[in-house]
Image: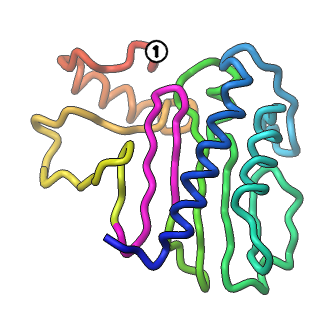
C-alpha cells in the first residue's frame, strides 16, 4: 500500500536504525546518569541518540521537540514537527530493566500522523502512519477483537514506580496464574 507519508516512514525507520546503532555502544544497567531539573535522569546515551535522530529526521522547514534538546520556540511556527524522546525510560535503562525505547512522532498542523517506537532490549519495533496502519517488526499489526481480559496473553502496564502501585499489585494478584508475569515487577 502506498502511503502519503512513505518518505516520513522511511525516515523514521532510518532513524530507528541509527538509534539502534547508538544503543549498541551502551550496556543497560552499566551507565551513569546525571539529573536534569525536576530530578529526571539523563545519560550520554540520551544525548547521543538525540543527536542521531536529529541528524536523520530533521529537514529544512520542520520543527523539533525533543526531551533532550533545548526547546526552540520557532517550532511553533512550523507546519510539521518531530516530537521525540530519544531514550524513553532512562530510569529503566540505567537500572538495566528492558522497558526503554526510542519514541518518534511526526505532527502535521498539530495532528500526529506518523510515528515509530523501538525497544532495543526486546528488538520490537512499531512504525505506522494514519493512512497505512501499524507494522510490528515489519509485519502488519492489528488490534485484538477481545472485549475482556479473559484469555488475554499480554497485559501492558507501567511499572509501579510510575503508576499506582496498589492497582498494579491487584492486577498481579488477579493474574497470578499467568506463567508469563514478569518476576521483576513489585
Along the line of sight, which residue is nearer the eye, 107 or 160?
107
- Secondary structure at numbered mark 1: loop
Q: Is residue 45 left or right of residue 122?
A: right
Residue at which label 1 appears:
184
Q: Is residue 93 left or right of residue 75?
A: left
Please provide percent x and percent y for residue 164: 48, 38
Q: How is the image coloured?
A: rainbow
The region drawn magenta spans: 115-132
Question: Measured along the vertical axis of the image, is residue 113 above or below residue 152?
Answer: below
123 inside magenta stretch: yes
16 inside magenta stretch: no
Q: Main secondary structure of the magenta part?
A: strand
User: What residue appears at the point 62 percent right and 36 percent down from the top-left corner?
Assistant: 20
Q: Residues within 10 Å of mark 1 (few under 14, many from 20)?
A: few
Q: Quadrant of residue 48?
A: top right
Please provide percent x and percent y for residue 46: 77, 39
User: What residue appears at the point 65 percent right and 26 percent down from the top-left corner?
Assistant: 93
Q: Quadrant of residue 127?
A: bottom left
Q: How many marks?
A: 1
Please provide percent x and percent y for residue 95: 66, 19
What quarter of the picture does the N terminus occupy? bottom left
Question: Measured along the vertical axis of the image, is residue 163 above or below residue 131?
Answer: above
User: What residue appears at the point 40 percent right and 73 percent down from the top-left corner?
Assistant: 130
Q: Quadrant of residue 62?
A: bottom right
User: What residue appears at the point 87 percent right and 30 percent down from the top-left corner?
Assistant: 34
Please provide percent x and percent y for residue 120: 55, 31
Q: Is residue 95 left or right of residue 182?
A: right
Question: Measured along the vertical axis of the image, is residue 108 above or below residue 121?
Answer: below
Amino acid at each position: 500500500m502506498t502511503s502519503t507519508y512513505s518518505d516520513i516512514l522511511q525516515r523514521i525507520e532510518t532513524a530507528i536504525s541509527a538509534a539502534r546503532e547508538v544503543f549498541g555502544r551502551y550496556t543497560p544497567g552499566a551507565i551513569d546518569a546525571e539529573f536534569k531539573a525536576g530530578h529526571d535522569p539523563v545519560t550520554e546515551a540520551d544525548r547521543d541518540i538525540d543527536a542521531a535522530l536529529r541528524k536523520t529526521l530533521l529537514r529544512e522547514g520542520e520543527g523539533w521537540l525533543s526531551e533532550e534538546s533545548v526547546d526552540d520556540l520557532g517550532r511553533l511556527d512550523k507546519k510539521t514537527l518531530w516530537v521525540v524522546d530519544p531514550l524513553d525510560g532512562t530510569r529503566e535503562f540505567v537500572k538495566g530493566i528492558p522497558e526503554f525505547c526510542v519514541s518518534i512522532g511526526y505532527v502535521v498542523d498539530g495532528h500526529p500522523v506518523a510515528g515509530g517506537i523501538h525497544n532495543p532490549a526486546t528488538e520490537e519495533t512499531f512504525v505506522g502512519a494514519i493512512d497505512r496502519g501499524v507494522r510490528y517488526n515489519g509485519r502488519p499489526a492489528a488490534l485484538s477483537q477481545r472485549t475482556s481480559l479473559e484469555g488475554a496473553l499480554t497485559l501492558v502496564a507501567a511499572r509501579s514506580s510510575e503508576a499506582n502501585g496498589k492497582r498494579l499489585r491487584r492486577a498481579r494478584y488477579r493474574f497470578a496464574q499467568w506463567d508469563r508475569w514478569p518476576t521483576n515487577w513489585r
